[in-house]
Image: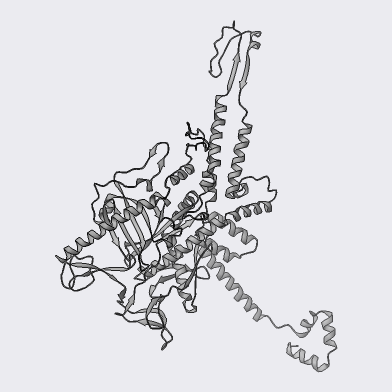
């Protein structure tokens, strides 16, 4: 009965939260323009819709027949497939090994987490919408023979995030909402709640509203999962989720460790059993715990003052769980915009030019299509002229000259000039030149001139690049916090040593445990993160191969180094060739040393004959005793 009363009280509390949070969501959503996001997407896709004249109230009466899509062209030009790599430095000299562990393990994880696909999506989303989102999640259901659970990276569209009004930094927000379109079966399997009779509340967050055909992609088998992320009075992260009127998840102190324990004896539940393995009870309760009990001895980061080695904690010792301190979301902005949560959209910048080009191209097409020819013939000539190709009309030589053809066509020179001018305006505003796009540029007369133009264009895009690297830096910091919070077992990763050979290591979170001045254990997070392009060169193997050939030809690298690069792109037999070259080099050096040792030492006369005349004169002027000493020292 006590359990029933507690459950009823909890249900009332949750419903009260639900009503308050729903109202909060509607207020925040009302101040967030989702329609403009749909319009940007359709401009990128080449919508035929055109904007109305700002000085007139009536809407356009027709759509564009011919779309010259400069939005698509310029955004695709700016796509950068470079994946920034982690760079980590320790603030403490004794934790350099741990800094390398963080750096190498994250770099090893990124390909497995699908970062290349996420980056490819975000390159376009960031430019189109002004910002993009990466969510860092923990999948507890991931199973491996040696460990359980794994980090996941999820690409979120900006339409799915409703920020707290008036706050421009995500990590500074008291709350925000994530809206996700999921299947009804997913809700039932994950949360155990049947929503089969519910409808999708907000289909617009994961679909586009087509201004021509209406809303699309509405699926009856889906519902909107709404999650409110928030920070409580203690600064801890909480999570509250619902579907329509169903509360599916209420997790205050979200990152705190939750364990199911037997309600009778307190033993941790074996999830493969529906009863307690110790006392047989079938009643369990979920507890929030701040400490774990070590099942085996572990080596930690603190140094034992008696041995001078890393301290070893015995099995049975209680150590704290690490709790992440930030929202698990990374916001990557395109170009910062004052007093706004989102960044500046490239689509918004060139929208007017795109609209003008669509209208003029369509008008120009109409001029050309409506043009034609007029054929004049005398009234008394009985000839039927059709539009058939190669029509045959029989007549004599005199009648042949009585036909006349007048061509009707409009002059589109000014139209073309206007389109070109609008194109150049859009280019200029985005900082993109013909040379940057790889087009022929008559203003750049030499290779150096082209390099300078590309560099100038790239310089104007440095803010975009800087924001990308800043976002990846924050991503690496959150991934590190997740490793400390959830990696209960050591996790393998592969790195490279100084010679480019594979090193097989493990990430051990307990090596970050240290003691403070009072002897209390805590996790050391004193590391400086940054993102660089150390391994961020283009992934195209042909590009890397050509660059390596050029460096070899220029003498910048030798053959073993060349084949080390070939090994990095999995060139056939590259590893074996590199080893053979290294062995040949070592054998040559050994042979040269042996030959030098076997050669007889040159006599004094032989050495003296190789000296320059001035040195010989100096020797001859020395006293006999000094000459004899020099001859003895050189074996003469």
Is 359 on the left or on the right of 435, as rendered?
Answer: left
Residue at the (58%, 22%) spot, across then down: 372
User: Is residue 302 positioned above or below 411 on the image?
Assistant: below
Is 313 on the left or on the right of 111, as rendered?
Answer: left
Specify the quadrant that holds the C terminus.
bottom right
Residue at the (56%, 55%) spot, across then down: 543
Q: How many marks?
A: 0
Q: Where residue 476 appears, x then y in whole percent?
A: 45, 64
Front position in the image: 246 or 456: 246
Task: Determine the image quadrant of residue 215.
Answer: top left
Specify the quadrant that holds the N terminus.
bottom left
Q: In this view, which residue lies farthest toward the left?
A: 1
Front position in the image: 450 or 241: 241
Residue at the (40%, 65%) spot, across then down: 326
Q: Where residue 587 appears, x then y in whole percent?
A: 58, 73
Front position in the image: 409 or 177: 177
Asked whether residue 253 is in view, the answer is: yes
Q: Where residue 446 appears, x then y in whole percent?
A: 69, 50
Task: Determine the image quadrant of residue 289.
Answer: bottom left
């Amino acid at each position: 009965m006590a359990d029933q009363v507690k459950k009823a009280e909890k249900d009332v509390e949750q419903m009260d939260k639900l009503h308050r949070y729903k109202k909060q969501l509607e207020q925040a959503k009302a101040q967030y323009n989702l329609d403009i996001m749909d319009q940007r997407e359709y401009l990128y896709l080449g919508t035929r819709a055109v904007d109305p004249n700002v000085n007139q109230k009536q809407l356009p009466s027709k759509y564009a027949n011919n779309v010259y899509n400069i939005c698509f062209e310029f955004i695709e030009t700016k796509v950068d497939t470079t994946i920034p790599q982690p760079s980590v430095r320790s603030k403490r000299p004794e934790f350099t090994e741990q800094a390398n562990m963080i750096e190498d393990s994250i770099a090893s994880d990124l390909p497995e987490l699908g970062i290349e696909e996420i980056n490819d999506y975000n390159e376009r989303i960031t430019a189109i919408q002004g910002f993009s989102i990466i969510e860092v999640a923990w999948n507890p259901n991931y199973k491996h023979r040696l460990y359980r659970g794994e980090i996941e990276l999820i690409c979120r569209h900006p339409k799915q995030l409703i920020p707290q009004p008036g706050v421009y930094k995500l990590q500074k927000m008291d709350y925000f909402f994530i809206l996700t379109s999921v299947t009804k079966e997913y809700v039932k399997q994950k949360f155990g709640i049947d929503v089969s009779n519910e409808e999708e509340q907000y289909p617009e967050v994961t679909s586009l509203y087509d201004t021509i055909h209406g809303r699309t992609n509405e699926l009856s088998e889906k519902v909107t999962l709404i999650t409110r992320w928030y920070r409580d009075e203690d600064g801890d992260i909480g999570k509250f989720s619902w579907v329509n009127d169903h509360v599916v998840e209420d997790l205050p102190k979200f990152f705190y460790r939750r364990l199911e324990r037997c309600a009778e004896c307190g033993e941790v539940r074996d999830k493969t059993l529906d009863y307690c393995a110790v006392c047989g009870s079938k009643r369990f309760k979920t507890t929030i715990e701040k400490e774990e009990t070590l099942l085996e001895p572990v080596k930690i980061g603190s140094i034992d003052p008696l041995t001078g080695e890393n301290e070893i904690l015995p099995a049975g010792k209680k150590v704290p769980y690490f709790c992440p301190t930030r929202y698990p979301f990374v916001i990557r902005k395109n170009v910062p915009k004052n007093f706004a949560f989102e960044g500046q959209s490239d689509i918004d910048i060139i929208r007017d030019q795109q609209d003008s080009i669509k209208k003029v191209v369509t008008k120009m097409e109409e001029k050309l299509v409506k043009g034609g020819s007029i054929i004049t013939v005398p009234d008394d000539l009985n000839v039927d002229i059709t539009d058939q190709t190669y029509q045959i009309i029989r007549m004599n030589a005199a009648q042949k000259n009585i036909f006349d053809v007048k061509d009707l066509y409009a002059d589109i020179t000014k139209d073309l000039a206007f389109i070109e001018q609008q194109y150049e305006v859009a280019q200029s505003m985005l900082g993109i030149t013909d040379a940057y796009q790889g087009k022929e540029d008559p203003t750049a007369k030499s290779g150096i001139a082209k390099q300078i133009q590309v560099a100038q264009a790239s310089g104007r895009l440095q803010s975009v690049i800087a924001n990308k690297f800043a976002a990846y830096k924050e991503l690496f910091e959150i991934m590190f916090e997740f490793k400390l919070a959830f990696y209960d077992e050591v996790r393998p990763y592969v790195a490279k040593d100084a010679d480019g050979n594979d090193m097989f290591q493990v990430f051990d979170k307990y090596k970050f445990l240290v003691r403070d001045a009072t002897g209390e254990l805590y996790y050391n997070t004193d590391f400086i993160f940054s993102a660089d392009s150390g391994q961020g060169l283009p992934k195209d193997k042909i590009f890397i191969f050509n660059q390596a050939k050029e460096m070899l030809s220029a003498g910048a690298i030798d053959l073993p180094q060349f084949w080390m690069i070939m090994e990095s792109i999995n060139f056939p037999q590259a590893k074996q060739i590199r080893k053979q070259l290294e062995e040949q080099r070592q054998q040559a050096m050994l042979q040269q040393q042996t030959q030098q040792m076997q050669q007889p030492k040159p006599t004094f006369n032989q050495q003296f004959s190789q000296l320059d005349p001035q040195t010989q004169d100096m020797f001859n002027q020395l006293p006999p005793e000094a000459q004899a000493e020099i001859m003895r020292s050189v074996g003469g």
